[in-house]
Amino acid sequence: MKSDPEDFRRALLDHFDRRRRPLPWRRERTPYRVMVSEFMLQQTRAETVVPYYDRWLRRFPGWDALAGATADDVLLAWKGLGYYRRARSLHRTAVIVRERYGGRLPGDPAELRTLPGVGEYTAGAVASIAFGVPVPAVDGNVKRVLSRLLDVGDPTAAQLRDEATRLLDPERPGDFNEAIMELGATVCTPRSPRCHRCPVRPHCLADKAGTVGSRPLKRRRPPLPRVDYVTAVVVRGGAPVTLLTRRPATGLLAGMWEFPTAEIHRHPAGATAATGAPAPPPYPPPRPVRRPARSSGPRQAHLQPLSRDLPPRDRAL
């Protein structure tokens, strides 16, 4: 039997009102600040984001400041958060907001989804938190909570969306979405969930069935590819000048600076199925964009083969 929506909302929001974390993006919920926080929080823990968020707002306090910045300035401010595609998408979004919308972010979820890097979850989170639109926001934490509430091992996206919509509080959609996300982050965790502290435990079918530990089902991750690279470190004698190249605009670590590097071999995990031969490189060797000036001093070149384990997240970049 499914939860009564009103009882569920009351229990969840009462808990949230008493125990919500004092996160900086909750102090002033302007559309810009909400959007920045949502981009930073994608696949990153809140406690990691806090210092980056504060520094970001000092550097880029609004849409105009961000839209007027260079790509290098944006990436430098993002340095350390990883997943740099998020920074580029947020930068492009700022330019669109300034040029297309006159500096005012639209509140319609469908229109938000046309912006770079904004999918269904981010559009729902921004629309509900910044504009009060009654639309669900289903991230990884919410998926886990709903899977346990429904006692379904592998719920479909449609099941999750329907249940989130059914439970959503139409009067406080932003608070509700934050509350259920926070429940998944702090109580209904992937391992060792704190069921004794859960405000909605009476509504949880997995708790009644004793299946909380197996909800949702854990999917096997594909093996990590292993790739060999060769890197040249070229230093001009005398003045400390080192040759750097910029990676291609797409692919792994797109647009980042590095020593000249080229892929030389992929191990069997990345081999082609037909021949077993190493797969072709996913991108051409980086093209040098700057050469050191001529100098009478000697030059040194060191070649160092590197083996890198590429996590699944980078393969999608």
Image (cartoon, rainbow, N blue to C red):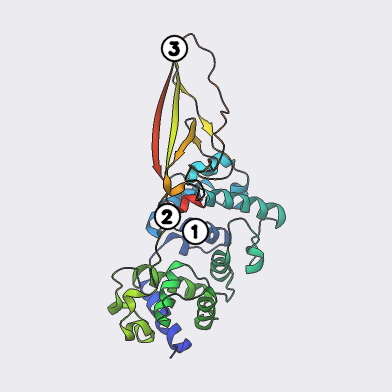
Cβ–Cβ below 8 Å for labels 2 and 1?
yes
Is 99 on the left-hand or right-hand side of 244? right
Q: Which residue is mark 3?
A: 298
Q: Nearer the viewer, mark 1 or mark 3?
A: 3
The label number, if any, that marks residue 1 in the structure image: none
Give percent across and percent down for residue 13. Answer: 43, 79
SS for dot 1:
helix
Q: What amino acid is found at the position of numbered circle 1 in the picture?
A: Ser
Give percent across and percent down for residue 111. Answer: 67, 65
Q: Quadrant of residue 151?
A: bottom left
Is 211 on the left-hand or right-hand side of 49? left
Q: Is any part of residue 175 visible from this angle?
A: yes
Is 192 on the left-hand or right-hand side of 138? left
Q: What amino acid is found at the position of numbered circle 2 in the picture?
A: Val
Residue located farthest toward the front when viewing the structure as drawn: 275
Dot 2 or dot 3, earlier in sequence? 2
The label number, if any, that marks residue 49 in the structure image: 2
